[in-house]
Image: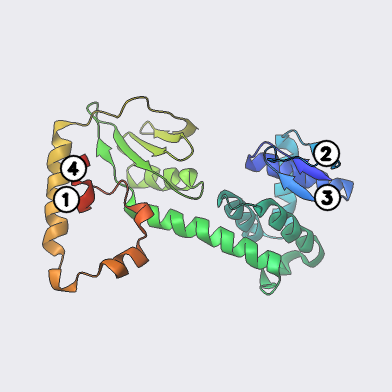
Amino acid sequence: MIFRYDGSYAGLLTVLQRIFARRETPDAILCREPEQADLFAAFFESNTEPELAARLTAAIRLHLGAETAANLRDAFLSGQGGIEMDLYRYLKLGWRVRRELDRHLTDPNVAAVHRAAHRTRHEAHRFKGLLRFRETEDGLLYAPFRPDADILAKLAAHFAIRLGDRRWLIHDVRRDLGALYDGRHWAIGALTLETAPTFSAEEDEWQELWRAFFDHIAIPERANPRLQKRFMPMKYWEFLVEHPSLQKNK
């Protein structure tokens, strides 16, 4: 049977709880309509129930541990195709081996979940240093970025502490989501900007100073573009104000 859910983490936990309760072995877990549906396949449409999701989360923390709960969520946030079945098999093994689950590093499903979770955490760590805030006319700090994983909540929690005295908006342009902080609390919601933000007069000056500093500390004789791209792939350059190719878009 193919199980379908709404694509949210709570939705995934709900469908997993139902699968284990029904003692089913799913053929697939999908978050949207397949491009070509199998006319002979049986589908189960799972509506999200926060109570079921919370019940499964509590059971995972109690019987498998906080590490497993974190791995489950971070692997899901990776957005990797087919991760749902990896997570199902990961949990299925977990109910058998309990708190030994994350020590089964040679199990292909455990390894797949660990790799996906690591990618999410690694990208979140990178963007804590690569996110660039720009001051708008009304004093709001605006930071667009285009991550592979759904790490907006991780960055919002980080910058609420780091920039606690400023209002800011972190914009995930890939998913059309924004995290808005009012100086006390942050919240995530849908965000689509029809026009680009208007930045303050001081913003241009700060960008020029940052580029001057960036150029000053660079050592031309040690320039190694290939190594730079290896450690910081070009997909992260889009919103970096210090990169030469972006100076025309300041």
Disc 3 is placed on an element classified as helix
- Image check: 164 left or right of 45? left
Disc 1 is placed on an element classified as helix
- Image check: 164 left or right of 110? left
Local packing at callout 2 (Cα closer than 10 Å; few below 14, some 14-19, many 20+) is few
Is the Cβ of the residue at disc 2 closer than 8 Å to that at disc 4?
Answer: no
- Distance Cα–Cα, label 3 vs label 1: 54 Å
Q: Amino acid at mark 4?
A: Lys
- Distance Cα–Cα, label 1 vs label 4: 15 Å
Q: Amino acid at mark 1?
A: Trp
Q: Amino acid at mark 3?
A: Phe
Residue identified by numbered label 3 = 20
The percent position of residue 76, horizontal first and vertical second, equals 61, 51
Residue identified by numbered label 1 = 210
> Depth-wise, is mark 2 or mark 4 nearer the camera?
2
Which of the two labelled residues, at mark 3 and mark 4, occupies the earlier sequence position? 3
The type of colouring in the image is: rainbow
- Say if 224 sits above or below 72 in the image: below
The residue closer to the viewer here, 234 or 177, is 234
